[in-house]
Image: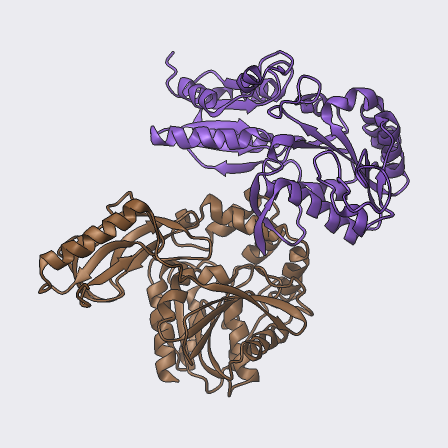
Amino acid sequence: MSDERIGRVAMPKWGLSMKTGKITEWIAAEGDEVEEGDDLAEIDTDKIAGTLEASEGGVLRRIVAEAGTDAPVGCTIAVVAPAEVPDAEIDAVVAEAREQLARGVPEEDDGPRTETAEVGGRAISYASLGDGDEVVVLVHGYGGDKNSWLFVQEPLAAGRTVHALDLPGHGASAKDVGDGSLEFLADTVLGFLDAVGARSAHLVGHSLGGAVVTAAAARAPGRVRSLTLVSPAGYGPEADADYLRGFAAAGTRRELKPQLLKLFADESQVNRQLVDDLLKYKRLDGVDAALAALLRTLLGEDGRPALDVTGLLGVTPVAAVWGAQDRIIPPSNAASLRAAGAGVRVVEGAGHMAHMEAPAAVVAAVEEALKGS
Amino acid sequence: MARSISYREAINEALAQEMERDPAVVVLGEDNAGGAGAPGEDDAWGGVLGVTKGLYHRFPDRVLDTPISESAFIGAAVGAATRGLRPVAELMFIDFMGVCFDQIFNQAAKFRYMFGGKAVTPVVIRAMYGAGLRAAAQHSQAMYPVFTSVPGLKVVLPSSAYEAKGLMIQAIRDDDPVIFCEHKAMYDTVGEVPQESYTIPFGEANVVREGGDATVVALGRMVSVAEEAADELAQAGVQCEIVDPRTTSPLDADTILESVEQTGRLVVVDEAGPRCGLAADISALVAREAFGALQAPIGTVTAPHTPVPFSPSLEDLYIPDAQQVAAAVKSVVDWKR
C-alpha cells in the first residue's frame, strides 16, 4: 500500500477518441512546489495541444514520463507528494508507474460516456462525466460540438454530473433544427434536462450556446440555477458576421482554414486534424441546411449580427469569461454583462475559444457561478 | 455517429442509403442480386466479393443480375442514365473494360458535350482494380489512368472506408459518368465512418498528414503504403506530407502544388505502371507549374511496365511497397547537385 499523500499525475483523457498523449514539455520541474491549477506540462494529442494542470498541491517529486514520451491515457506520468513523504515510498510508486508505462497498459478508461437522448423527436447526442446530484450542462457554439469542452468537462466533474451536448444540427445529434430559432434551441436544452431526469441544472454556454442558455434561463428560471457564459453571442452588437458566413459556406479545407484561424489567439491550435474533423461534420447530409437556418437567427436581413438576449437576463447568477484576443465576439461586448452585475473574466492568451485556450479560467468561472447560486 | 466498418461495408452502406433516399438509384451487374441468379436466394453473393450483399432483399426491384455481357449491361446502364435513372453498374474487374469501352469513352463520356449540355449521364461504373490477390495478369491491373485520360469521365480512387462511402454517395448524386475504382485488397480494411450520409467533393485532395521535408502524392491503396513509409522516415527525422488526390479526374492540382511549394520535393506513388500514368502526369504538372520550388528531381514509385505476374513471389515484388517509397523519399531529400 502506498501512502495516500502520494498523488499520481495521470495522462488525461481529452475527448472521446484520445488514446495516448505526447508530453511535449514539462513546465514544472522536479522539486517544484505546485499548487492546484498550476501548469505542469504541455501535452499534444492527435486532435489538439493543451496544458495539463495540477489537480492537487504538493511537491513535484518525480517525472515518470520525460518530455517526448507518448503515454496511454490514465498512465501515471509524474508523482506529486508533500516534501515529508520519504524518497523510498516515492521510488516504489515511480517503479510501478514506469513498469506500467513500459507495458503501455492504461488504467481503466474513465473518460466521458457518449449517449443519446430523445428530445422533441430528435436524437440528441451527449457525453457525460462524473456522478453527483448537481448537474452541469455544457452547450457549444455555432458549428461546434460536445468535444469542444474536452479540457473543462473533467475538472468540473468532480462530485458532479457534467453533460456536454450536441445541439440539433451539430455533432452526432439530429440535423433538423426546426425553425432554427433561439427559442427552439433553448427548448431543446430544457427538454434535454427532462430527458436526463435533471429537475434543475447549471448551464454553461459558449458563443451561440451562451445566448441559448440565457434564453433557457429566461424560459425556465426555476430550473436554471446558474449561467456561465464564454464569449456569449447576443450581449452586444459587435460580432464578425463574415466569420459566420464564411464558416457556413466553406466546403473545402482551403476555404475553411482561414475562418478557423480567427477562432484562436494561438493559430497553431488549428491543426490538420481540427480542420479535417470540421470538414467531415460539414459534409454530413443536412448540416448545410442546419447551419443556414441558424445563420438566419444569428444575422439579420441586413447581414449584421441580430441576436439580442440582454433583455433576457433575470435573477439567475451569471459569470462570464472572454478571451482578450477574441476576434469573433470581442470582449467589448461584455459591457452589458458588467452593467448587469455579472463577474466577467477577460483572459489574456485566449481568443474566441477560451474553454480550449484558457480552460482553467472557464472552470473557475463555473465554480464561481455555482457558489453564487 | 462514427463507428468502425470495412471498406466493403462502407460502399454497401452508401448504396443502401442512396437507394433509400432516391428511387431512381438502381444497381446492376453480374451476381449483384442472387449470385446464382435466382430471385429470393438467401445466400445472395452480392457480387463476386460481396459488396452488394443484402441489397437485393431490401430493394428487390432495383438490384438486377445481368448476363455475362459487359457491353450489354454497361450500355444499358449508360442509356438508363440518360433517361432519368441513376444506375450503379458493377463491371467486376476493371480489366474487363476492354469489352465495353465504347459505351464508356465514346458514348457516356461524350453526351453532355455533344448535346450541348442538354443531356446528362449520371451513371456510376464500379470496378475492382489492383494486384495482391493472386488473380493473375487479367484480373489485377490498375487501369484507371486510361479512364483519367478521357475528358467527360470522373475517376475516383477511395483510399479508406471513410473516403469510400462519401465518394460513392457523391458519385451517385453527380450528373456525370463516374468510374469508381475499388481496390480489391482493401475491402476488409476498417476505418471510422459516420452512420449518416455524407459526400466528399470531387477534385479535393486530402492532406493525410503534414510534413515539411517532402511531398508524397499517393493514390488509392498506395496511401496506406505511403503512411507506412512516412512512419519509418519520421523515426529517421524526415517528415513527409502525404497528399491523397482521391479523384484523378478532376485532379486537385492546387493542393499538390501548394504542398510542393512548401517542401520543395516530390515523390509520386502509384500502383499503375510508369508509362502514361498518374506518376508521369503529376510529375509533369509539378515540373511545369512549380519548377522554381523544386530542390531535387521528382521521384516516382510505380509498378514496373510489365503484366502483373502470376508467380506469387514476383507479384509481391511488382506492387510498390513502403521500403521503395522510403528509399525514394530519402533519395530526393539527400539529393545534391
Residue B190 lies in what quarter of the image? top right
Colour assignment, chain B? purple
Q: How many marks?
A: 0
Left or right, A49 with respect to A9, comes to right
Up-down: is B210 above or below A129? above
Judging depth in this view, the residue of A149 and B320 nearest the camera is: B320
Which color was chain A given?
Answer: brown
User: Is residue A271 found left or right of B191 in the rendered image?
Assistant: left
Location of residue B263 in the rendering, given as x and y in whole percent from the top left corner? 44, 28
Percent position of residue B54, x then y: 75, 47
Between A65 and A352, the one nearer to me in the picture: A65
| A211, A278: nearer the viewer | A278
Q: Quadrant of residue A373?
A: bottom left
Q: Residue at x 85, y 40 (%)?
A: B64
> Where in the figure is residue A167, as x and y percent of width and height?
57, 66
**Residue A174 higher or lower than A216, as above or below:** above
For the N terminus of chain A, give its image quadrant.
Answer: bottom left
